[in-house]
Image (cartoon, rainbow, N blue to C red):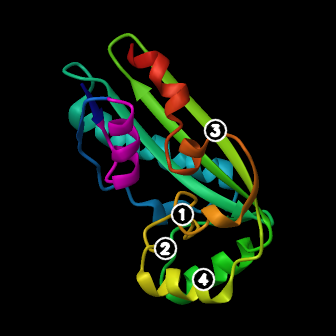
């Protein structure tokens, strides 16, 4: 049993799909205080901040703690969670027909193990269909997701190629985590 220090439904689904037993208890770390526009630095600072908050609250004596964060970048621009539908459209139009890299950072700590990993997955997308894009934005599924992207949903039919793990793009590289849970 581990403590998932994240409110993400997608991260919870990733762990469930691998048969990992967990308790989900996210925190309140304020990402808005982070000023860097460097995507790798941002995800590192956000994950460390979330970890520090939850480690102070829970420790890891009773169960290991897992914390993660994810950002998206296209054309070297840091794409965070959309503030509204217009912001989501701007980010998705930037990604349409483009190369998009999703960067996830995780920290896992048990009594005797500490790992910090930053993983990247890069997608090459076909141009998004305008009608599909409008439907996706109107549905609201794009909200609350880094870069408004959903590679396991809306974006899937537009993927030309991928370099990396889909789980990284979904917010947690489970392939790198699993060996530490055995």
Q: Badge 4 is on which residue?
A: 133
Q: Earlier in the sequence, mark 4 or mark 3?
A: 3
Q: Is residue 83 left or right of residue 124?
A: left
- Splitting the image into 4 quarters, where does residue 159 fall? bottom right
Quadrant containing the N terminus in the rendered view: top left
Viewer-side residue, 104 vs 43: 104
Marks 4 & 3, CB-CB < 8 Å contact: no
Establish if 30 lies above or below 26.
below
Give the alpha-carbon distance from disc 3 to disc 2, as whole Å. 22 Å
Q: Residue at x 54, y 70 (%)?
A: 148
Measure the C-alpha gap from mark 4 to mark 3: 27 Å
Specify which label sits upstream in the sequence, 4 or 1. 4
Q: Position of residue 90 (x, y in %)?
A: 65, 83
The mark closer to the camera, 1 or 3, is 1
Residues at discs 2 and 1 in contact (Cβ within 8 Å): yes
Q: Secondary structure at mark 4?
A: helix
Residue that mark 2 sits on: 142
Mark 3 vs mark 2: in front? 2
Q: Which residue is mark 1?
A: 150
* Disc 3 target residue: 119
User: x, y percentage for residue 131?
Assistant: 61, 89
Q: Is residue 155 left or right of residue 141?
A: right
Query: Within 10 Å of the Cα at label 4, are there few (<14), some (14-19), or many (20+) other Cα atoms?
Result: some
Which corner quadrant holds the C terminus? top left
């Amino acid at each position: 049993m581990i403590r998932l220090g994240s409110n993400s439904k997608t991260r919870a689904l990733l762990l469930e799909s691998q048969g990992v037993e967990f308790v989900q208890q996210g925190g309140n770390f304020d990402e808005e205080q982070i000023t860097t526009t460097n995507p790798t630095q941002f995800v590192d600072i956000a994950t460390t901040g979330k970890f520090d908050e939850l480690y102070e609250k829970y420790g890891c004596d009773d169960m290991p703690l897992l914390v993660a964060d994810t950002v998206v970048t296209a054309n070297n621009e840091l794409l965070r969670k959309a503030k509204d539908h217009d912001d989501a459209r701007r980010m998705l139009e930037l990604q349409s027909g483009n190369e998009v890299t999703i960067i996830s950072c995780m920290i896992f700590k048990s009594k005797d193990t500490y790992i910090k990993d930053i993983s990247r997955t890069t997608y090459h997308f076909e141009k998004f269909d305008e009608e599909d894009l409008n439907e996706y934005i109107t549905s609201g599924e794009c909200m609350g997701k880094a870069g408004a992207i959903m590679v396991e949903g809306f974006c899937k039919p537009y993927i030309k190629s991928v370099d990396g793990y889909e789980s990284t793009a979904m917010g947690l590289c489970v392939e790198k985590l699993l060996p530490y849970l055995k």
